[in-house]
Image (cartoon, grey):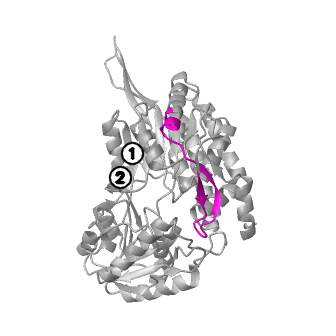
Amino acid sequence: MPIKKEDVFQLARDAQLYAGALVPGLDNSHELHFDTLNPFNQQVIGRVQRCNGRHIDAAVKAGRAAFESGVWSTLPPGERKRIMLRWSALLQEHHEELAALDCLDAGKPITECLNTDIPDTIHTIAWYAEAVDKLFGKISPTASDNLGLIVKEPIGVVGAVLPWNFPALMLAWKAAPALAAGNSLVIKPAELTSLSAYRIVQLAHEAGIPKDVLTLVTGLGEETGKPLGLHPDVDMVSFTGSTEVGRLFLTYSAQSNLKEIVLECGGKSPQIIFEDSYALEEIADNILSAAFWNMGENCSCGSRLIVHKSVKEDLLKILQKRLVDGWKVGDPQDPETAIGPMIEPAHFEKVCGYIKAAKEEGAKLIRGGEALKLGAGMSIEPTIFDGVTAEMTLFQEEVFGPVLAVSTFETEAEAIHLANATSYGLAASLYTSDLRRAQRVSRAIKAGTVSINCFSEGDIATPFGGYKTSGFGGRDKGLEALEQYVQTKTVWYGG
């Protein structure tokens, strides 16, 4: 039965609207806290502990001791698998509660949380649980009196720094493969969206993952993320967030122990519509989902529509009609809402600044462009600008809001050039009925994921990450994600 609007807050309240350090031996009763707000109405919904370097140090020490003891790192793979499957089952039992937490804390539409985010979170953990006992080493070809073993070992203590746009799912993308590989893990959720992470880690402990193997530290980036990045006993940090903060983690690594850094940063993803695309009516919903799903607060957001000039006008008419008919802006607790508010006032002002700049630089506003007087007034209606050139700010910079920039092309070569004409390279989509063109263009686009005749990031089995300033160092998802959480060792037996 679909969740009712009036039930959302109660479901979350039952889980306690609180997040704080989950580190063995730490007493949180007298710690500093800050309020966490509902982005739609700016009302206080709970409290988050303001941790600092002391908490990070305690979490890392706990993780290191657990790793060296082998309580998790040397546990038989089948046992780790059993515990992680139990974790997945517990998340399923609490899926409505977790959906409600992300809805209230991040302003995400409840229908998306229930139907996409939390099911994908649960599936991710179950998928990596099944992968635990399928991470094989190798035997090298040697002379008959030698034996060369190439073995995979967990890297040690891993820090996971999460973004605010997909709080539960991004936790799963990092925690599941890191734990499956046998590491200890310190999770630092975004200060704006810590509630579901706290509950998910609690359920992990209930499932049997030792409390010193999986710890949680909440708080501001400068006070918790930075100490995690600088800590000399952290072996690796996996970060998802802005390119700006990603650069900081590279600096932290250089200033400390040269820990491995995996970055999944921003994007400015193109959607290329060729003149030989399938019927425009058939592809319109995919185009809109790419641009406006999750309020455009999505690193793979298809925020640049690069369309052949012969079909542009017809396509824009269809898109505008579909927006009116099917993309309701409103309270994220309402199951009918498709677009909720921006995450916080500062981000709302940033998105409004991009809209203002687009107007000043000469882009043509053809739809939206206004803040709506809903809740606290931080909702922005789906916005489309036409006539956006490669020199404009709206073409080059990540908005992270519901704003679509439309550019036109005449030749395939021009389309490819425009697609690659930013510093980012996370994702792209292209639409054509010509199989050979699809092959040519998908190979020419500099992006980590290219979807053809759809908007997609693939599924849990396909790796996700970017080129250029969208990140490097590894991938989320797929068996490839396991590789970044292990080290390769050669063991050589002499004759």
Element carrying mark 2: loop
**Seen in the image, is 102 located left or right of residue 466?**
right
Name the residue nearer the viewer: 362 or 115: 362
Residue at 34%, 16% (x, y): give it.
144
Q: Residue at the spot x=42%, y=35% of the render?
A: 231
Residue 45 falls within the magenta-colored stretch: yes
The residue nearer to you, when weighing 396 against 379, is 379
Which residue has dot 1 on it? 262
What label sits on residue 471 in the rendered view?
Answer: 2
The answer to which quarter of the image holds residue 305 is bottom left
* Residue 160, x across and y down, in percent: 48, 44
Whether label 1 touches label 2, CB < 8 Å: yes
Residue range in magenta is: 34-57
Comparing 356 with 183, the one in front is 356
User: Split into 4 quadrants, where in the image is the N terminus?
Assistant: bottom right
Is any atom of residue 169 visible in this view? yes
The answer for how far apart the CA atoms under marks 1 and 2 are is: 8 Å
Residue 345 at x, y percent in the picture? 50, 67
